[in-house]
Image (spheres, grey):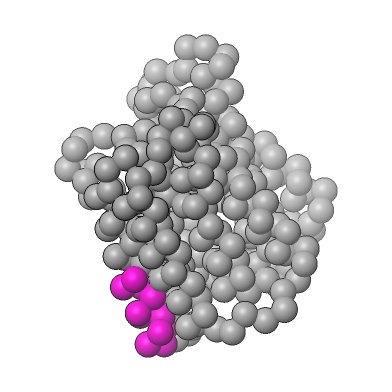
Amino acid sequence: MPRPLLLAAPALFLILWSAGFAIAKLGLEHAQPLTLLALRYSCVLVLLIPLALILRPPMPRTARAWADIAIVGFLIQVVYFGLCYVAFKSGVSAGGVAIIVCLQPILVALAAPKFVGEATSPRGWLGLALGLAGAALVIFGRSSIAAENLFGVACTVFALFGITAGTLWEKRFGVTHHPVTSNLIQYATGAAFTLPAAWATENMAVTWNAEFAAALAYLVIGNSLLAMTLLLAMIRAGQVARVSALFYLVPALSALFAWPLLGEVMPPLAWAGLALAGLGVAIVSKAKT
């Protein structure tokens, strides 16, 4: 990835990724979770396969390289997105999902020294703590956390482990591949699991209208193609604890996007949390390990 784009990648990723939560909630009003994911991944493949035939990007040279890309795709596209969507549909609040998923930077920082050989400095831990505190302020500022559906909470916990494991696996075993190659393998993996799962557990009914078509288009292009390409590039280029710290800003920015899209108001406490989370991410990004 060109250096100017890599420097802009964190901001672009946060905008694209965070907006996806509110837009996915719009999409889930018209389709069941696994059906929406299967349709999303199938549409991505419809775009990528002709592109791959035209560009002919280099493919992985070994079976292990193929497997590593597919494993990252399974952990993020199937485990993380699949279980988050199921959790939302089962009745878990946005605040409940967000506060659990926000633990990802802490898990990455704890596992990184042993798994990828990256230690987090005291200054880095301070930034992680501030980021977590800021994310919690956003969540509690937006809504009271009520009793949650236990099945949905369990899904969210496993989703957290899925994206954590996918981040660490990509950093340790991932190598630089053409973005079309990486995305093609990962979304083929996602479709291979979500299509039969949707067929077996859901009626696969979709209410087609302009709102759903717009939501699906964004999830395909903004989330699946652009945001995922930026995330994988940042993981390969930087330390995983720093990249994961960006996720502290996701609940705050998701709340910001949900304001106009879903009518969910950002109270003053949430704005304070956004500022605190931003400070934490800034400290982590500059911390020396």
Residue lying furthest right in this view?
Answer: 200
**Residue 142: x, y in percent?**
49, 82
Q: Is residue 168 above or below residue 259?
A: above
71 or 262: which is nearer to us? 71
Location of residue 239 by image quarter: top left
Classify the position of the N terminus by image quarter.
top left
Residue beneath the point at 59% across and 31% down: 71
Residue range corresponding to the magenta coloring = 266-276
Task: Indicate whether 65 appears above or below 4.
Answer: above
Q: Residue at point 37% right, 87% down? A: 268
Say above or below: 168 vs 15.
above
Where is residue 254 shown, x and y percent of the image? 44, 69
Q: Please name the residue shown 54% across and 45% down the image.
A: 164
Does 61 appear above or below 237?
A: above
Q: Is residue 120 visible?
A: yes
In the rendering, at what x and y percent does residue 72 appear?
55, 35
